[in-house]
Amino acid sequence: MPDKINVALIGGGRTGTPLLHEMLKYPYINITGVADLNPAAEGIMVAAKKGIFTTSDPMTLVKKGDEIDILIEVSGDNTLKKAIKSALEKSGNKKTIIMHDLIARLFISVCTQQDQLIPTMHPEDIGIGS
């Protein structure tokens, strides 16, 4: 079992930034990169200040491949999720786990001690089977 879990984050906005802040608290989580289409997104700025790799091209982060144990995709872009899955399959990457948005919301809710599950930040992405 590894001493650290390598995590990449796609989406540095309203959902991704609280996740990033929470994960930065733990020495056993290594953030391998943060991607957001908006280079001025809060999560991008936080990561850059910590010396973490940032990019405005999510697929550049996905190409880190086996360097990533868990890929958290909270951009709200359903087409991006399909592209990520396809890229990982084409590269033969069987290691990286893509965390579902619902799990990310649960994680934020628990870590920030909410009394209810935080709502989706992307109303168009309400389905849990995507």
Image (cartoon, helix red, strand yellow):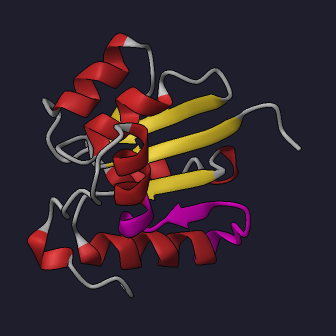
From the viewer's perspective, is residue 1 above or below residue 95? above
Identified at 22% across, 69% down, the residue is 77
Q: Can you say which quadrant of the picture contains the N terminus?
A: top right
Identified at 53% across, 65% down, the residue is 98
- Please state if 50 lies on the left or on the right of 29 as rendered: left
From the viewer's perspective, is residue 40 above or below residue 58? above
**Front position in the image: 99 or 118:** 118
Q: Position of residue 53 (x, y in %)?
A: 44, 28
**Front position in the image: 29 or 66:** 29
> Residue 128, located in which quarter of the rendered image?
bottom left
Q: Which residues are magenta?
A: 90-103
Residue 59 colored magenta? no
Outermost residue toward the right? 1
Q: Position of residue 85 (x, y in %)?
A: 50, 75
Identified at 62% across, 48% down, the residue is 68
Q: Position of residue 103 (x, y in %)?
A: 44, 63
- Please state if 68 lies on the left or on the right of 58 as rendered: right
From the viewer's perspective, is residue 25 above or below residue 37? above
Q: Position of residue 69 (x, y in %)?
A: 66, 51
Identified at 51% across, 71% down, the residue is 87
